[in-house]
Amino acid sequence: MKSIEVENDLYRYIASQTESIGEDASSILRRLLGLPAVGEIVVDGPLKDPAQVKAAAKVTASVPEQSEPAKTMEASSVSGDFSSLLALTDISEHKAAVGRFLFLLEQSYHVMPSSFDAVLSISGRDRVYFAKDEATLLASNASTKPKQIGQTPYWVITNSNTGKKRSMLTQALVVMGCDKAMAKQIAEQI
């Protein structure tokens, strides 16, 4: 077995994805990356450019299987169709409010990735709510419990109550261009 060095935030992210006691980093990464079991990966030819691998993964992820309807919004969805956030079947897999909050934020990013930067303007009286890195949120308040918004480059604070999470999601959707009434309806799913 080989060892690799990763930054602390990446290690914490991998560790946060643990689904069972004793699951090791290799198993977590295989699951997250959709890789086969040990010894089944075939490496053919030279190593590929990481940007090409990421682009290919997005294309593969956005093509739903023929036998099963798409469960979540993919990056290939029609840009700006926020109503699709009302019919997400995967939301029930997230038992805690914070999980549903992060899931809905990630799905809203997929609907309007070009407008998501607007959420960075949302803040409280003495707190920053959204950022592009964990350190920015921790600098605003050390007890914010920042979490990365799924597979996006954005982070959000998570130590607020459910009502505040709904308010933050509503504000985020509105600044991205969603109708306020629909934004409130989407946020009620938290």
Image (spheres, grey):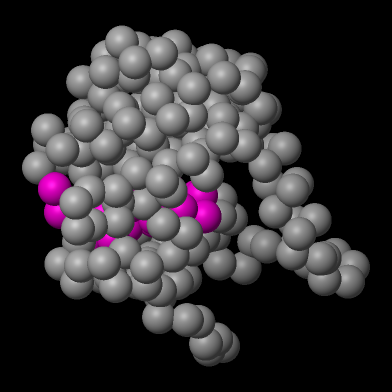
* The quadrant where residue 59 appears: top right
> Is 150 part of what is drawn in magenta?
yes
- Residue 31 appearing in the image: no
Residue 115 left/right relative to 15: right
For the point 15% across and 67% down, the residue is 143
Q: Position of residue 71 (x, y in %)?
A: 46, 23
Q: Residue furthest right?
A: 45
Residue 190 left/right relative to 176: left
Residue 109 left/right relative to 114: left
Instruction: Report the magenta residues as a range.
Output: 145-160
Q: Position of residue 22 (x, y in %)?
A: 26, 70
Residue 178 left/right relative to 59: left
Q: Position of residue 181 (x, y in %)?
A: 31, 10
Instruction: Pick whichever, 176 or 112, lies toward us.
Output: 176
For the point 22% across and 32% down, the residue is 167
For the point 52% across and 44% down, the residue is 117
Q: Position of residue 170 (x, y in %)?
A: 30, 27
Location of residue 142 with respect to 2 vertically, above or below = above
Instruction: Pick whichever, 167 or 31, lies toward us.
Output: 167
Majority secondary structure in the magenta region: loop
